[in-house]
Image (spheres, rainbow, N blue to C red):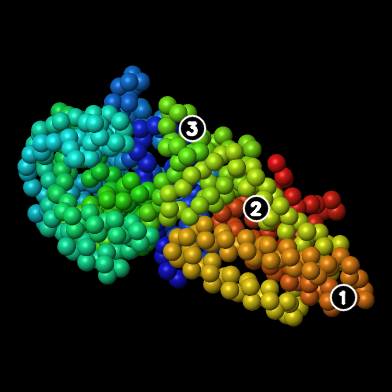
Amino acid sequence: MAKFYLTTPIYYASGAPHIGHAFATIYADIIARYHRLKGDPTFFLVGTDEHGSKIAEKAHELGQTPQEFVDSIAAQYQKLWTALNIESDIFIRTTSDKHKSGVKKFFEKLRDTGALYEGSYEGFYCTGCEDFITESKLINGLCPDHQRAPEKIREKNYFFNLKKYLLAVREKIISGEFRIAPETRKNEILNIIDSGIPDFSITRDRQRVSWGIPYFYDESQTIYVWGDALINYVTALDFPDGELYKKFWPADVHIVGSEINKFHSIYWPAMLLAAGVPLPRGVFVHGLFTINGQKMSKTIGNIIDPMALIPTYGVDGTRYLLVSQFPASEHGDIRAEEFTAKYNSDLANGFGNLLARTYTMIRNSGLRGSDTLGDIVNIDKEIQGLLRKGQEQYDRHFANYELFDALQTVFHAIKRLDRYINETEPWKLNAATDKEKLSEILETLRIGAEQVTKWLSPFLPEKCAAAQQFAAGLKTGSLPQDAKLNLFPRI
């Protein structure tokens, strides 16, 4: 039994959570639930990144202290994760004492190995990105992502000696010891390394950036927000001596968006090598998506609040709609006006209808006791083979974090089971004269229904639990007379 540790990014607490944050967190929650079903000891991390000049700026605009501001934002994230039935094991905050203590221990290791050196930086800094930006990447003097002019600064910093560790990081990526998926994101990182990437500032002048963890060895400096935030993945486990750290590190996968691939696939493994800490086993980089063909923007007004979807589609319906639009490894477009059609097609008319038909026929047949259904081994061979092959495909897709493809496998089975019902027409068979044939058909459908329910349970945990409870009551004959299974009422 293998342990499994996965993380989402800890989201930057500069504003309320939106559909992009919900997508990545639901995605990770599904993977965590899959591993728990397998019996793997699993630890699942979510949290918020709460330091940096952008947050101080936002708090000032609202007349709040930075701590007051991030407290309110963190509460919004926690409320959303509860509403979306996210079963995380920790919500880490970079303003917590637990995190600060771990950062200090990590920096001690960096300093002891000589990975840090004092220098000065002169160039452009984008507060929106919380990152340094080269002049060549500016468009008309503006950051292309935030449409604002970066600040030109000159200041004393402490630098992380990235060049010293780049070759080792590159070798571990190429060998697969540190796996970056999908392949396009791996190639992206190798191109960045091969094109030459400079050492990066790991502190900022405290007079410029005061909202952050003070650098322990120079009170004039603040730890750079990324240098602070990345370390959360070990501080959450009580690095370096905690029992959780000993049990779950290294992480099996960091799930991140493509815009922060560089930080997680270059900076983070280099920092770990410098500190003498084992590298994560890998990073899965999901694409970004637009809304109705446009980038999410408050100005345009196309930001979708995930909480607003729940009253219409339910918790499980919302979870499903956000992760089933397109393969996560690619960039894609979400069209909210298509949500209802997809909900009806896949959930109401697809999965929900299959279960309702199957369990109604079993109930009406009278062959629902453990002495009739459940002890027949002669089920339809084609369906049996389909389910066996489907399990292999499903597990392979989860091993590669291909949830869209895993869903394709499940719904292929659902459509085949629907056709099987129409082909065999069990409602035309008599329970007395055609008992053996009817039992074979209904047992085939029961096994198929239970299998697709199990496959979908990480995606639709509440509805699948209700379906499993209904099936158990059907088998024992303990269902109330008027009990009906209507998992996804048609909208």
Residue ranking furthest to the top:
63
Residue identifier under label 3: 302
Q: Secondary structure at mark 2?
A: helix
Rounded to the nearest angstrom, the CA distance separating label 2 from label 1 is 32 Å
Q: Is disc 2 surrounded by few (<14), some (14 to 19) or many (20+) residues within 10 Å? A: some
The foreground one among 24 and 89 is 24
Say whether disc 2 or disc 1 marks the residue closer to the N-terminus.
Answer: 2
Q: Residue at x 24, y 31 (%)?
A: 140
Q: Is residue 44 visible?
A: no
Residue identifier under label 1: 435
Say whether disc 3 or disc 1 marks the residue closer to the N-terminus.
Answer: 3
Judge depth for marks 2 and 1 and give the one in front: 2
Q: Secondary structure at mark 1?
A: helix
- Residue 354 sits in quarter: bottom right
Q: Is disc 1 surrounded by few (<14), some (14 to 19) or many (20+) residues within 10 Å? A: some
Q: Residue at x 13, y 36 (%)?
A: 123
Q: Secondary structure at mark 3?
A: loop
Q: Is disc 3 surrounded by few (<14), some (14 to 19) or many (20+) residues within 10 Å? A: some
